Image: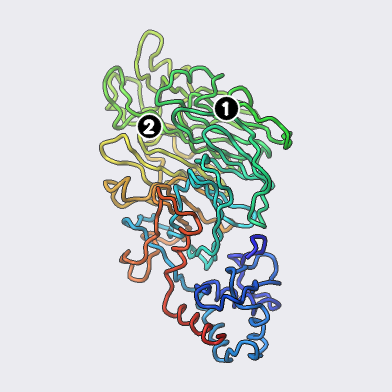
Amino acid sequence: MAESEPYLSPHRDCWDQTVRPRCLLAQLVTALPVQHFIRPDFAHTWTRGLPDGYLSPPTTGIPLEELESLHNGSMRNTGVSGALAAGLYATAAVAQTQCSNILVPTYSPPVVASGWQAQLVAGGLTKPRSIAFDSTGALLVVESGQGISRHRFTDNGGTCLASNHSHMLVDLATLNHGLALSNDGNTIYASSAEAVFAWAYDARGGRVTGQPQTIVANMSNSDLVTRTLLMSKKQPGTLLVSRGSGDNDAIQTEDVTNGLSQIRAFNLTNLTSSSSPYNFNTDGAVLGWGLRNSVGVSEHPVTGGIYAVENSVDGVQRNGVDVHENNPGEELNFLGYLNGTQGGTGNFGYPHCFAVWQVDEIPENDGLAVGKQFAVQENSTLRDETCAEDYVPPRLTFPAHYAPLDIKFSAGGEEAYITFRGSFDRSSPVGYRLSSIAFNAATGEPVAAADSNDALTDVLTNPDNTACPDRCFRPVGLAFDSAGRLWMSSDSTGEIYVLQRTGESGSGTFVQPSGGSGSGSNSGGNGGGSDNAAAGLRASETAMTDWMIAAALGVWLAVV
């Protein structure tokens, strides 16, 4: 199938009578492993002529003329009986309402919060990190060490989605995390440890064109190598780039001109194909610095306020006493607005001052509370009072070592969702969850006070963190689709989840095959392997029910 041909929109139900016969049959055959049953010499595209947004199935299939003959009642070309044709229509209807290819993780299934439903919809990816949807509804995924893959899903409603197409869009092993799309959707931005690249993108065709252009450079670090990207919607053409520290407590971050531990904004509107790349250290506007590793960055959809989630320092001592188990806390920081009305250029304290989480474990803690900053080593020039006076405190503080990696706002701005990849520098594992924070949509401010220790509401968690990190999901990237569903990547397991609000009371639902034993087909997770995206996602197409295989065999017998 040519990549430029249209796919079936997941939200179409084939009610257009001019294309209904072809659409229904296309949906049926797409739901089946037809490449194993239909004669391979029929190499025509069998949904040719469907309106834009409908599905083009796999490369081999039944010629369009033969499918149309089913609807017209003429069986001369195929030999398909009227009864079989009627059965195919009935089977297609069933395929619309049953979720038949449910994936099951190889570890204990996640726990879903009340009012939510979650489902595993893809596996076999290589360290999936940032994710985003293009203008056609295709999911773009940065697979760390591989490049960018593109995935299409057949949507059967709710969280019931099945992969129907996958390919590597960009093969570039240096890409490791960052991903963004231009405001018009015609350019893809992705990052390595050293640079930000741009590709001209044909979303309808599912391909990039030409060679990548380097637009931001000079970002190499010895440590903390992710370069998160955010394209502003409030200030179109403004790209935010987050760069972490050179190591755990790099003293050189005290100098803003070295470019470490900061978030900068770059105006791309005047760039041409021949423009030299921006130098991260000397170009762009500094939105915040003294930020050890702010991997998640987001823009409030109503106010335009910029928020970042900070991964704080490991192995901290306070005046020579080890306090690292529960301090310092991770942070939600407010960086101001891109229009310059408030904030920007503030220093958030790293590498000298850090947010308190567990007050009673910090020696000499008079005047400290959750969210206030403490000095790691007090002396004549640096005390807790210095931290309060000279640095910007976090807007909210989270438990130490949770490791927040992404933040996305709901469309109305009343909630922010944060992935916590989980700890490595703690005796008992913590984090490993997707959580939400309530926001005042009008003001763009969190509802919880700055000293709150319960601002987080868990949405998706692992049932037993003692099994982590080896036998649990580790969430990274988030993206909302056009239906308002929240998608999430898990890099260590090579998986993609989708979540949707149900509004129902009682326990949330993690979708599993009938019986819910978790003993069905697994996701084929490949968090550290080398399988390509297409091969990995084919795992989601193999869990077929008996009636589907029987229907496919019926088609085979009819046309041979």
Query: Which corner quadrant of the image does residue 421 belong to?
Result: top left
Image quadrant in which you'd find residue 230: top right
Above/below status of 222 relative to 19 = above
| Display colour scheme | rainbow
**Among the two numbered marks 1 and 2 on one chain, the one whose residue lies closer to the N terminus:** 1
Side of 405 where 279 appears, left or right? right
Taking 33 as reference, is 431 left or right?
left
Q: How many numbered marks, from 0 up? A: 2
* Residue 384 shows in this picture: yes
Q: In which quarter of the image is the C terminus?
A: bottom right
Residue occupying image coordinates x 65% and y 44%: 199
Mark 1–mark 2 CB contact (< 8 Å): no
Q: Residue at x 36, y 58 (%)?
A: 105
- In front of the other: 355 or 419: 419
Check disc 1 and report the residue beneath it.
Answer: 218
Which residue is outermost to the top?
380
Secondary element type, mark 1: loop
> Residue 95 appears at what percent x and percent y?
51, 75
Q: Foreground: 427 or 523?
A: 523
Residue that appears at 44% across and 38% down: 448
> Residue 343 location, x and y as percent?
58, 27
Residue 414 appears in the rendering: no
- Residue at 42 percent across and 75 percent down: it is 545
- Dot 1 amino acid type: Asn
**Which amino acid, mark 2?**
Gly
Which disc number belongs to residue 329?
2
**Residue 2 in which image quadrant:** bottom right
- Quarter of the picture holding the N terminus: bottom right
Element carrying mark 2 = loop
Q: Would you call the spot at circle 2 few (<14 residues within 10 Å), some (14-19), or many (20 or more)?
A: many
